[in-house]
Amino acid sequence: MKKLTKKSLFIIPLLLLLNSCGFHDGLTSNINASQTSVVLSQKNYKVIDKVSGTATAKYIFGIGGISAKALVEKARTSMVTKNKLNGGAKAYIYPTVDEHMTFIFPFYIQKTVTYSGYLIEFTD
């Protein structure tokens, strides 16, 4: 019984240390700094689709990856590349930036940024 207790005193803290966690956060600061203004006071548009793009950075012992601003820009570029504004008067509205982090502290951290919004087309 004493051996089991001594083993568990070693194993339980080790398992707690190696346990991974994750959390999700919406970035509320204006990292993208878009200055385009679209007035939607009239019914002269239709919503085509909800669009998004993602970017991921991985850090080993805190080393690697890219800055938060560059990660957001990469996700925005991914969204725009997948959903081009070809043909007609189109725009992206209501941009939202979400961040999800998965980590096994302090060994491994993965940040995933999702940039999403709505693609609209003006009808008049």
Image (cartoon, rainbow, N blue to C red):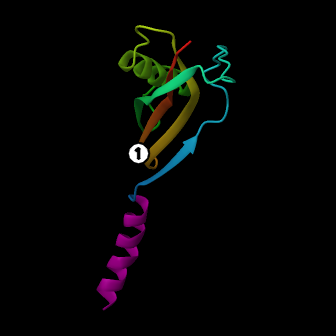
Magenta stretch: includes residue 8? yes
Name the residue located 36 percent from the left edge and 20 percent from the top edge: 82
Give percent across and percent down for residue 70.
51, 21
Name the residue located 51 percent from the left edge and 28 percent from the top edge: 118
Quadrant the N terminus occupies: bottom left
Name the residue located 67 percent from the left edge and 15 percent from the top edge: 37
Residue under label 1, please give it.
Answer: 107
Quadrant the C terminus occupies: top right
Q: Is residue 117 left or right of residue 33?
A: left
In-front residue for pair 52/105: 52
Q: Is residue 91 left or right of residue 59?
A: right
Give percent across and percent down for residue 107.
41, 45
Query: Is 107 above or below relative to 34?
Result: below
- The boundaries of the magenta stretch are 1-17
Q: Main secondary structure of the magenta part?
A: helix
Query: Is 61 above or below relative to 47?
Result: below
